[in-house]
Image (cartoon, rainbow, N blue to C red):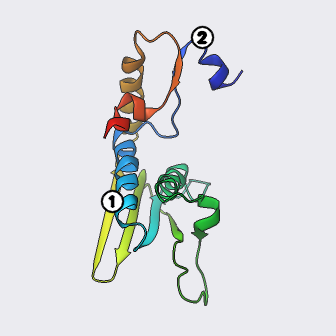
């Protein structure tokens, strides 16, 4: 049984990341991309502890998806991972990803919208895994009284109305 079919009988919040801050950041990225995305270079930089095995992280990919979606693009068509060597000039309209794995970093994510003469950076830093637990508890409280349905953190935080 998957979440969609289970949601016919019970209420479920399905989220890749339960951090309130990360989910607010995703909404901010959508807004920034709609205003600035067509004329800026977009980069996503993420850092995690040395033991993390996937790169880029799921949150970094969600950031890229939010930006690409706001620009009516498919991330798989515009993502650039791990530049190295002589790469030539940046291809306009791409979204770059850079990954750091070091020490005990819980999670740091930055989206950069860079133009000539100015740069906007939207950053989220988690210093404790407790932030994810707090978001999960907030989701559980929000679900209280709901009989069925499949929801995400945008629903829990009422981000769809911003």
Q: Is residue 90 above or below residue 47?
A: below
Decide: few, some or many residues near mark 1? Use Cα within 10 Å; few <14, some 14-19, many ≥20: some
Q: Is 161 located above or below residue 56 in the figure?
A: above
Give the label, 2 or 1, closer to the camera: 2
Q: Residue at x 54, y 88 (%)?
A: 89
Image spot of residue 57 (x, y percent): 54, 54
Is residue 2 visible to the viewer in this orientation of the structure?
yes
Q: Which residue is mark 2?
A: 9
| Residue at (37% x, 20% y) in the render | 142
| Left or right relative to 103: residue 91 | right
Q: Of the two numbered discs 2 and 1 on the same chain, state the one appearing first in sequence.
A: 2
Q: Which residue is mark 1?
A: 122
- Residue 31 falls in image quadrant: bottom left
Tag 1, which secondary structure?
A: strand
Residue 46 in the image: state x and y as whole percent: 46, 61
Q: Quadrant of residue 87?
A: bottom right
Looking at the rendering, in which quadrant would you find the C terminus? top left
Q: Secondary structure at mark 2?
A: loop
Q: Residue at position x 47%, y 31% from top?
A: 152
Whether residue 117 sits left or right of residue 147 in the image: it is left
From mark 2 to mark 1, how far is it between C-alphas? 38 Å
């Amino acid at each position: 049984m998957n979440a969609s079919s289970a949601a016919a009988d019970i209420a479920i919040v399905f989220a890749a990341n339960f951090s309130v801050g990360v989910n607010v950041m995703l909404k901010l990225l959508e807004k920034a991309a709609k205003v600035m995305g067509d004329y800026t270079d977009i980069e996503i930089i993420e850092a995690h502890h040395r033991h993390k095995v996937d790169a880029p992280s799921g949150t970094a990919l969600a950031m890229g998806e939010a930006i690409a979606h706001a620009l009516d693009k498919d991330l798989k068509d515009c993502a650039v991972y791990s530049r190295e060597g002589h790469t030539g000039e940046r291809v306009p309209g791409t979204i770059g990803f850079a990954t750091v794995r070091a020490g005990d970093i819980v999670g740091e994510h930055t989206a950069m919208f860079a133009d000539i003469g100015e740069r906007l950076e939207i950053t989220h830093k988690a210093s404790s895994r407790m932030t994810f637990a707090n978001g999960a508890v907030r989701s559980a409280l929000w679900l209280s009284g709901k009989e069925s349905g499949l929801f995400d953190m945008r629903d829990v935080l009422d981000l769809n109305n911003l």
